[in-house]
Image (cartoon, rainbow, N blue to C red):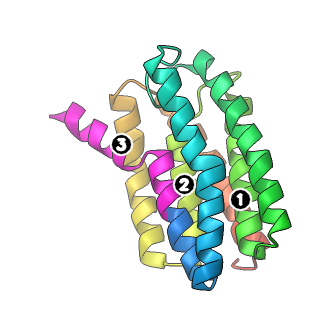
Amino acid sequence: MNQPLALFLSRLAHPLVILTLFVFYSNLRLQEFDAALYTISGMLGITIIPLIVWNWIKWKQGVYANFDVSIREQRFSMFGVIFLLAAILVAFLHLSDQPKEIFLGSLLLIQAILLTFLLNFRLKSSLHLAVCSYLAMAMLPLHVPMALGLIALAPWLAWARVSLGRHHWSEVIAGSLVGTGSGVQLLYLTDYL
């Protein structure tokens, strides 16, 4: 019974799933409809869709043990792709003159991923928890009940990742701290705090 629930929670709150939902919601809240659709298309087309395709191909080729890239040594190539896509995204956001909240939000999410990458040399910090915790903070100015929902989801997600054997408790705590820290920075820099 625990394994199916853990797997369900892990898939439901996969970074690519909740990040996609956040991209849609936040852009539609912060911009006019046409501008939001342009930004959403750019963000999904530059980062999320290529990363999904990359992970899927590498998983099917047997290079990655699973789509989550849960083996620490296998994560380095994924991080390389993430940072290449992130650089292209930053250029897109800068050149398309995005609102401060969207530009800073993207930079600080990249920062959280960079910190997770650096921690990966010592322990496999949880990207699931880093992204979930970051988005919980980023959601506070947009929709408090959804932010509280993500905050409430985080301990269950941590339990799921540990139950599935993908992380140890120290790794989910590290991911949570990285995501929360970057999220608090976003709140401070956008004058929410």
Do the numbered discs 3 and 2 sit on residues whose CB atoms are within 8 Å?
A: no
Q: Earlier in the sequence, mark 3 or mark 1?
A: 3
Number of residues whose C-alpha sits closer than 10 Å to that of mark 1, classed few (under 14), some (14–19) or many (20 or more) = some
Q: Residue at x 70, y 63 (%)?
A: 105
Q: Identify residue type, mark 2.
A: Ser
Q: Residue furthest bottom?
A: 32
- Which quarter of the image is occupied by the N terminus? top left
Q: CA distance from mark 3 to mark 2?
A: 16 Å
Disc marking residue 133 = 2
- Which quarter of the image is occupied by the C terminus? bottom right
In percent of width and height, residue 43 lies at 64, 58
Q: Would you say residue 69 is visible in this rendering?
A: no
Q: Please name the residue that numbered disc 1 is placed on.
A: 106
Q: Quadrant of residue 135?
A: bottom right
Q: Would you say residue 169 is visible in this rendering?
A: yes
In percent of width and height, residue 172 lies at 51, 37
Q: CA distance from mark 1 to mark 2?
A: 14 Å
Q: CA distance from mark 3 to mark 1?
A: 23 Å
Q: Main secondary structure of the magenta part?
A: helix
Q: Which residues are magenta?
A: 1-21
Q: Residue at x 72, y 73 (%)?
A: 101
Do the numbered discs 1 and 2 sit on residues whose CB atoms are within 8 Å?
A: no
Residue 6 is one of the magenta-drawn residues: yes
Q: Earlier in the sequence, mark 1 or mark 2?
A: 1
Q: Please name the residue that numbered disc 3 is placed on.
A: 11
The answer to whether 127 is drawn above or below residue 77 in the figure is: below
